[in-house]
Amino acid sequence: MAKILAIANQKGGVGKTTTSVNLAACLAAKKKRVLLVDCDPQGNATSGYGIQKSELDGTIYDVLINGQGIDDVLQKTEYRVDVVPANIELAGAEVELVAAISRETRLKKALDGVRERYDFIVIDCPPSLGLLTLNSLAAADAVLMPIQCEFYALEGVSQLMNTIRLVRDNLNPALAIEGVVMTMYDSRTKLAADVVAEVRKNFGNIVYKTLIPRTVRLSEAPSYGQPILYYDKRSKGAEVYMELAKEVLKREKK
Ligand code: ADP
Ligand code: MG
């Protein structure tokens, strides 16, 4: 049975998509069967796997709104990761779901049908706490929260924690916090070290040891439609995301 991880933080630009794309690829490289679900209308996880957003027959939108199955829209990739793609059409779902029946649990129901076939299902959440994120949190076993190493790092985190509490009380009592990953770390600055210390003080040992540095290669890879592991196998970015995957697998064993 797959473990379902929601990569969530309602702040934009903190590394959710980069982490979703690359963690998925690294878990797959470790022989895990991985499904990546793009739940962001920007569709950056989709294009990060080289899938053309404008030429899609079906997307996560059709799953959430038109009752299609995951298999109807699934895309196989050469990176050993299956992708449920998204494009801008998904922006409409946020509004259309409001009046829909069982509006928060549609993703969960859809994923139930394919869960047996995977070891991990990674959901890339949008930068908001709306119904798309609620669907992701209702479907997930655990939340993996990327936090950017910057001055306002913890701003908004309490909102996300509140949302997680609400989801536990109403939709998904077993929702856990898988871990916190610090992104865009710059080892030359005191600020980055201070932020990591602050986040560790707040979250304790659920913060991963692996720090994701800011590197140009990680920001270039999406424009080539490749996870970093394939874009530049020997890069620091590939190395750290493999380390993160190892940590995720280690926690899994415990
Ligand atoms: P989110 O999904 O939270 O909005 P992204 O993963 O899309 O964040 O990252 C935002 C931007 O920062 C993207 O342009 C991405 O390529 C870049 N980026 C993310 N992580 C790194 C990193 N470790 N080093 C350099 N650039 C990064
Ligand atoms: Mg994103």
Image (spheres, rainbow, N blue to C red):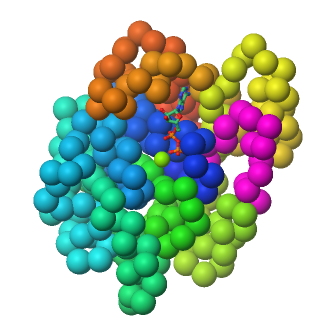
Q: Give the answer, above or below, for where 119 lies relative to 79.
A: below
Q: Residue at x 42, y 33 (%)?
A: 22
Q: Is 114 in front, or is 125?
A: 125
Q: Give the answer, above or below, for where 14 lies relative to 57.
A: above
Q: Give the answer, above or below, for where 76 lies relative to 138.
A: above
Q: Residue at x 25, y 36 (%)?
A: 50
Horizontal and vertical percent for residue 156? 73, 56
Left or right? Give the position of 43 relative to 192: left
Q: How many marks?
A: 0
Q: Give the answer, above or below, for where 106 lies relative to 254.
A: below
Q: Is 168 in front, or is 9?
A: 9
Range shown magenta: 143-158
Quadrant in which the N terminus appears: bottom left
Quadrant for residue 214, please give it.
top right
Q: Is 149 in front, or is 252?
A: 149
Q: Residue at x 31, y 21 (%)?
A: 230
Q: Is residue 3 visible?
A: no
Quadrant in which the C terminus appears: top right
Q: Residue at x 78, y 43 (%)?
A: 152
Horizontal and vertical percent for residue 103? 43, 82
